[in-house]
Image (cartoon, grey):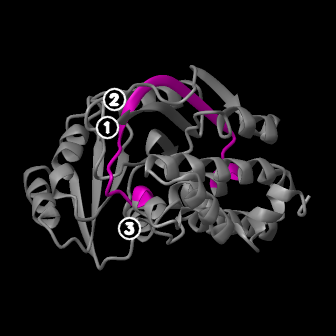
Amino acid sequence: MSNELISVIIPCYNLAGYVEKCMDSILGQTYRNLEIIAIDDGSTDETSEILAGYAEKDQRVVLIHQENAGAGRAMNRGIESARGEFLAFVDNDDWVEQDMYEKLHTALITNNADMSVCNFNLAYDDHIDFCYSHMCDETVDIADNVFNYYCCHCACPKPNNYVWTRLYRANVIKESDVRFEEFRLGADTLFNFKLFPYIKRVTFIKEGLYYYVQRNGSSVYTAAKKGNIAKVYADGFEALADYYASKGLEEFCSILPMHAYTRMRSTFFYSRLAGMSDEEIKASIEKGFQGRKIADYLTGAAI
Protein backbone atom coordinates (compact mmCIF):
# COMPACT_ATOMS: atom_id res chain seq x y z
CA MET A 1 0.00 0.00 0.00
CA SER A 2 1.23 3.46 -0.88
CA ASN A 3 2.36 5.89 1.78
CA GLU A 4 1.29 9.31 0.51
CA LEU A 5 1.22 12.27 2.86
CA ILE A 6 -2.10 13.02 4.59
CA SER A 7 -2.58 16.58 5.83
CA VAL A 8 -4.90 16.73 8.87
CA ILE A 9 -6.28 20.25 9.44
CA ILE A 10 -7.46 21.21 12.94
CA PRO A 11 -9.01 24.61 13.66
CA CYS A 12 -8.41 25.35 17.35
CA TYR A 13 -10.08 27.91 19.58
CA ASN A 14 -10.28 28.09 23.39
CA LEU A 15 -10.64 24.39 24.15
CA ALA A 16 -7.58 23.73 26.25
CA GLY A 17 -9.44 21.04 28.16
CA TYR A 18 -10.09 19.02 25.00
CA VAL A 19 -7.30 19.70 22.54
CA GLU A 20 -4.73 17.34 24.08
CA LYS A 21 -6.99 14.29 23.68
CA CYS A 22 -7.64 15.36 20.11
CA MET A 23 -3.96 15.83 19.27
CA ASP A 24 -2.90 12.60 20.98
CA SER A 25 -5.43 10.59 18.98
CA ILE A 26 -4.05 11.97 15.71
CA LEU A 27 -0.38 11.70 16.59
CA GLY A 28 -0.98 8.09 17.62
CA GLN A 29 -2.35 7.05 14.23
CA THR A 30 -1.19 3.76 12.73
CA TYR A 31 -0.84 5.69 9.46
CA ARG A 32 2.35 7.57 10.28
CA ASN A 33 2.94 9.79 7.25
CA LEU A 34 0.90 12.72 8.50
CA GLU A 35 1.17 16.47 8.42
CA ILE A 36 -0.90 17.87 11.31
CA ILE A 37 -1.79 21.52 10.65
CA ALA A 38 -3.15 23.13 13.83
CA ILE A 39 -4.55 26.63 13.29
CA ASP A 40 -4.80 28.62 16.52
CA ASP A 41 -7.76 30.90 15.84
CA GLY A 42 -6.80 33.61 18.32
CA SER A 43 -7.26 31.52 21.46
CA THR A 44 -7.23 33.38 24.77
CA ASP A 45 -6.83 30.33 27.03
CA GLU A 46 -3.92 27.85 27.14
CA THR A 47 -4.74 26.28 23.76
CA SER A 48 -1.92 28.12 21.96
CA GLU A 49 0.70 27.05 24.52
CA ILE A 50 -0.49 23.44 24.40
CA LEU A 51 -0.24 23.36 20.61
CA ALA A 52 3.23 24.92 20.72
CA GLY A 53 4.33 22.11 22.99
CA TYR A 54 3.18 19.51 20.46
CA ALA A 55 4.93 21.35 17.62
CA GLU A 56 8.19 21.29 19.59
CA LYS A 57 7.97 17.55 20.29
CA ASP A 58 6.80 16.26 16.89
CA GLN A 59 8.02 17.67 13.57
CA ARG A 60 4.81 16.51 11.89
CA VAL A 61 2.89 19.27 13.71
CA VAL A 62 2.66 22.61 11.90
CA LEU A 63 1.30 25.44 14.07
CA ILE A 64 -0.31 28.49 12.44
CA HIS A 65 -1.58 31.49 14.40
CA GLN A 66 -4.30 33.88 13.23
CA GLU A 67 -6.56 36.48 14.79
CA ASN A 68 -9.94 35.07 15.74
CA ALA A 69 -11.92 34.75 12.52
CA GLY A 70 -13.81 31.47 12.90
CA ALA A 71 -13.28 27.87 11.85
CA GLY A 72 -14.05 28.54 8.18
CA ARG A 73 -11.13 30.89 7.67
CA ALA A 74 -8.90 28.66 9.79
CA MET A 75 -9.63 25.63 7.63
CA ASN A 76 -9.01 27.65 4.47
CA ARG A 77 -5.61 28.60 5.88
CA GLY A 78 -5.00 24.92 6.42
CA ILE A 79 -5.96 24.01 2.86
CA GLU A 80 -3.60 26.60 1.40
CA SER A 81 -0.75 25.42 3.64
CA ALA A 82 -1.28 21.67 3.18
CA ARG A 83 1.36 19.67 1.32
CA GLY A 84 -0.39 16.30 1.41
CA GLU A 85 -1.90 14.31 -1.43
CA PHE A 86 -4.91 13.83 0.84
CA LEU A 87 -6.75 16.19 3.19
CA ALA A 88 -8.69 15.58 6.40
CA PHE A 89 -10.31 17.85 8.99
CA VAL A 90 -10.82 17.37 12.72
CA ASP A 91 -12.64 19.52 15.29
CA ASN A 92 -10.38 20.32 18.24
CA ASP A 93 -12.78 18.98 20.87
CA ASP A 94 -13.20 15.58 19.18
CA TRP A 95 -10.97 12.52 18.87
CA VAL A 96 -10.47 9.63 16.45
CA GLU A 97 -9.69 5.91 16.52
CA GLN A 98 -5.99 5.19 16.08
CA ASP A 99 -6.51 3.43 12.74
CA MET A 100 -8.97 5.91 11.24
CA TYR A 101 -6.68 7.34 8.56
CA GLU A 102 -5.15 3.99 7.70
CA LYS A 103 -8.63 2.59 7.02
CA LEU A 104 -9.87 5.67 5.16
CA HIS A 105 -6.74 5.75 3.00
CA THR A 106 -6.92 2.03 2.22
CA ALA A 107 -10.58 2.27 1.25
CA LEU A 108 -10.00 5.31 -0.97
CA ILE A 109 -7.04 3.78 -2.81
CA THR A 110 -8.56 0.31 -3.15
CA ASN A 111 -11.78 1.66 -4.64
CA ASN A 112 -10.17 4.45 -6.71
CA ALA A 113 -12.40 7.01 -5.03
CA ASP A 114 -12.14 10.78 -4.68
CA MET A 115 -13.33 10.66 -1.07
CA SER A 116 -13.70 8.05 1.66
CA VAL A 117 -16.18 8.38 4.53
CA CYS A 118 -16.38 6.59 7.87
CA ASN A 119 -19.18 6.43 10.41
CA PHE A 120 -19.05 8.46 13.64
CA ASN A 121 -19.97 8.12 17.30
CA LEU A 122 -21.77 10.75 19.40
CA ALA A 123 -19.79 11.19 22.63
CA TYR A 124 -21.79 12.56 25.57
CA ASP A 125 -20.55 13.13 29.12
CA ASP A 126 -22.11 9.89 30.37
CA HIS A 127 -22.38 7.65 27.31
CA ILE A 128 -21.50 7.13 23.64
CA ASP A 129 -23.91 6.44 20.79
CA PHE A 130 -21.80 4.21 18.56
CA CYS A 131 -22.09 4.20 14.75
CA TYR A 132 -24.70 6.94 14.83
CA SER A 133 -25.18 7.34 11.08
CA HIS A 134 -26.99 4.83 8.84
CA MET A 135 -24.15 3.49 6.68
CA CYS A 136 -22.80 0.31 5.12
CA ASP A 137 -19.57 -0.65 3.38
CA GLU A 138 -20.08 0.43 -0.23
CA THR A 139 -18.68 2.48 -3.09
CA VAL A 140 -20.96 4.84 -5.03
CA ASP A 141 -20.55 6.81 -8.25
CA ILE A 142 -22.31 10.13 -7.60
CA ALA A 143 -22.55 11.05 -11.27
CA ASP A 144 -24.81 8.07 -11.98
CA ASN A 145 -27.73 9.67 -10.10
CA VAL A 146 -27.14 12.80 -8.06
CA PHE A 147 -30.64 12.94 -6.54
CA ASN A 148 -30.61 9.28 -5.56
CA TYR A 149 -27.17 9.66 -3.95
CA TYR A 150 -28.37 12.67 -1.96
CA CYS A 151 -31.53 10.94 -0.75
CA CYS A 152 -29.72 7.76 0.29
CA HIS A 153 -26.59 9.26 1.83
CA CYS A 154 -27.30 12.87 2.81
CA ALA A 155 -31.00 13.08 3.61
CA CYS A 156 -31.36 9.74 5.39
CA PRO A 157 -32.72 9.66 9.00
CA LYS A 158 -29.23 9.94 10.55
CA PRO A 159 -27.07 11.58 7.89
CA ASN A 160 -23.30 11.97 7.76
CA ASN A 161 -22.60 15.30 6.05
CA TYR A 162 -19.61 16.40 8.13
CA VAL A 163 -16.12 17.13 6.82
CA TRP A 164 -14.39 15.41 9.72
CA THR A 165 -15.55 11.89 8.78
CA ARG A 166 -13.84 12.16 5.41
CA LEU A 167 -10.53 11.77 3.62
CA TYR A 168 -10.35 13.82 0.41
CA ARG A 169 -8.01 13.79 -2.54
CA ALA A 170 -6.31 17.16 -2.14
CA ASN A 171 -6.29 17.92 -5.87
CA VAL A 172 -10.11 17.70 -6.02
CA ILE A 173 -10.45 20.44 -3.40
CA LYS A 174 -7.65 22.64 -4.68
CA GLU A 175 -8.55 22.43 -8.37
CA SER A 176 -12.27 22.99 -7.73
CA ASP A 177 -11.41 26.12 -5.75
CA VAL A 178 -14.15 25.22 -3.26
CA ARG A 179 -13.41 26.75 0.12
CA PHE A 180 -15.17 27.15 3.45
CA GLU A 181 -17.54 30.05 3.88
CA GLU A 182 -16.64 32.18 6.87
CA PHE A 183 -19.85 31.35 8.74
CA ARG A 184 -19.28 30.52 12.38
CA LEU A 185 -21.61 27.53 12.11
CA GLY A 186 -22.57 25.16 9.31
CA ALA A 187 -19.55 25.86 7.10
CA ASP A 188 -18.57 22.19 6.92
CA THR A 189 -21.88 20.90 5.54
CA LEU A 190 -21.98 23.73 3.00
CA PHE A 191 -18.42 22.90 1.96
CA ASN A 192 -19.31 19.27 1.23
CA PHE A 193 -22.37 20.17 -0.82
CA LYS A 194 -20.43 22.75 -2.84
CA LEU A 195 -17.82 20.06 -3.51
CA PHE A 196 -20.47 17.60 -4.76
CA PRO A 197 -20.06 18.36 -8.48
CA TYR A 198 -16.33 17.62 -8.37
CA ILE A 199 -16.54 14.30 -6.49
CA LYS A 200 -17.13 11.41 -8.87
CA ARG A 201 -16.79 8.38 -6.59
CA VAL A 202 -17.24 7.96 -2.83
CA THR A 203 -16.43 4.93 -0.73
CA PHE A 204 -18.03 4.33 2.68
CA ILE A 205 -16.89 2.52 5.84
CA LYS A 206 -19.69 1.55 8.23
CA GLU A 207 -17.34 1.43 11.23
CA GLY A 208 -17.50 4.40 13.63
CA LEU A 209 -13.95 5.80 13.67
CA TYR A 210 -14.65 9.40 14.72
CA TYR A 211 -15.93 10.63 18.11
CA TYR A 212 -18.11 13.72 17.84
CA VAL A 213 -18.24 15.33 21.30
CA GLN A 214 -21.60 16.80 22.34
CA ARG A 215 -20.91 19.88 24.49
CA ASN A 216 -23.46 22.26 25.92
CA GLY A 217 -21.10 25.12 25.13
CA SER A 218 -20.49 24.17 21.49
CA SER A 219 -21.40 26.62 18.73
CA VAL A 220 -24.39 24.61 17.51
CA TYR A 221 -25.86 24.31 21.02
CA THR A 222 -25.25 28.00 21.68
CA ALA A 223 -26.97 29.00 18.44
CA ALA A 224 -29.91 26.73 19.23
CA LYS A 225 -30.33 28.14 22.73
CA LYS A 226 -30.26 31.69 21.39
CA GLY A 227 -32.90 30.83 18.79
CA ASN A 228 -30.49 31.64 15.93
CA ILE A 229 -29.95 28.21 14.42
CA ALA A 230 -32.76 28.51 11.85
CA LYS A 231 -31.19 31.71 10.50
CA VAL A 232 -27.80 30.00 10.33
CA TYR A 233 -29.24 27.17 8.26
CA ALA A 234 -31.13 29.65 6.05
CA ASP A 235 -27.85 31.49 5.39
CA GLY A 236 -26.06 28.29 4.45
CA PHE A 237 -28.89 27.09 2.24
CA GLU A 238 -28.97 30.40 0.38
CA ALA A 239 -25.21 30.30 -0.18
CA LEU A 240 -25.49 26.78 -1.64
CA ALA A 241 -28.43 27.67 -3.91
CA ASP A 242 -26.55 30.73 -5.17
CA TYR A 243 -23.42 28.65 -5.79
CA TYR A 244 -25.21 26.01 -7.87
CA ALA A 245 -27.02 28.71 -9.85
CA SER A 246 -23.84 30.69 -10.51
CA LYS A 247 -22.06 27.58 -11.81
CA GLY A 248 -24.99 26.45 -13.97
CA LEU A 249 -25.26 23.20 -12.01
CA GLU A 250 -28.91 22.48 -12.80
CA GLU A 251 -28.61 18.78 -11.99
CA PHE A 252 -27.47 19.62 -8.48
CA CYS A 253 -30.25 22.17 -8.04
CA SER A 254 -32.59 19.16 -8.02
CA ILE A 255 -31.48 18.33 -4.47
CA LEU A 256 -32.38 21.75 -3.04
CA PRO A 257 -36.01 20.98 -2.06
CA MET A 258 -34.86 17.91 -0.13
CA HIS A 259 -31.95 19.84 1.34
CA ALA A 260 -34.34 22.52 2.59
CA TYR A 261 -36.28 19.78 4.39
CA THR A 262 -33.11 18.42 6.03
CA ARG A 263 -32.19 21.91 7.25
CA MET A 264 -35.64 22.15 8.84
CA ARG A 265 -35.12 18.74 10.43
CA SER A 266 -31.71 19.74 11.79
CA THR A 267 -33.22 22.88 13.29
CA PHE A 268 -35.66 20.72 15.25
CA PHE A 269 -32.97 18.22 16.27
CA TYR A 270 -30.51 20.69 17.75
CA SER A 271 -33.19 22.94 19.21
CA ARG A 272 -34.67 20.02 21.13
CA LEU A 273 -31.23 18.97 22.34
CA ALA A 274 -30.78 22.52 23.61
CA GLY A 275 -34.01 22.20 25.61
CA MET A 276 -36.14 24.61 23.58
CA SER A 277 -39.92 24.33 23.76
CA ASP A 278 -42.13 23.75 20.72
CA GLU A 279 -43.20 27.39 20.76
CA GLU A 280 -39.58 28.59 20.92
CA ILE A 281 -38.63 26.34 18.01
CA LYS A 282 -41.60 27.55 15.98
CA ALA A 283 -40.66 31.18 16.64
CA SER A 284 -37.02 30.49 15.70
CA ILE A 285 -38.04 28.94 12.37
CA GLU A 286 -40.49 31.71 11.54
CA LYS A 287 -37.87 34.35 12.29
CA GLY A 288 -34.98 32.57 10.56
CA PHE A 289 -36.75 31.26 7.44
CA GLN A 290 -39.24 34.02 6.66
CA GLY A 291 -38.52 35.72 3.35
CA ARG A 292 -35.55 33.47 2.63
CA LYS A 293 -34.90 31.06 -0.26
CA ILE A 294 -35.18 28.07 2.05
CA ALA A 295 -38.84 28.99 2.69
CA ASP A 296 -39.48 29.13 -1.06
CA TYR A 297 -38.18 25.60 -1.49
CA LEU A 298 -40.08 24.28 1.52
CA THR A 299 -43.37 25.71 0.26
CA GLY A 300 -42.76 24.78 -3.37
CA ALA A 301 -42.62 28.40 -4.53
CA ALA A 302 -39.14 27.91 -6.00
CA ILE A 303 -39.93 24.69 -7.88
Q: x and y percent of residue 72 in the render?
A: 45, 66
Q: Nearer the viewer, residue 204 or 268?
A: 268
Rendered-image quadrant of the C terminus: bottom right
Name the amino acid type tagged 2.
Answer: Ile
Judged from the image, the secondary structure of the residue bearing numbered disc 2 is strand
Name the amino acid type tagged 3.
Answer: Ala
Q: Nearer the viewer, residue 9 or 58?
A: 9
Looking at the image, do the residues carrying marks 2 and 1 touch, with CB atoms under 8 Å apart? Answer: yes
Circle 1 residue: 124
Judged from the image, the secondary structure of the residue bearing numbered disc 3 is helix
Name which residue lies at 69% across and 41% down. Answer: 200
- Residues drawn in magenta: 195-221
Residue 74 marker: 3
Q: Residue 47, relative to residue 208: is it above or below?
A: below
Name which residue lies at 45% across and 67% down. Answer: 226
Name which residue lies at 38% across and 58% down. Answer: 82
Residue 128 marker: 2
Is residue 215 found inside the magenta-colored segment of the image? Answer: yes
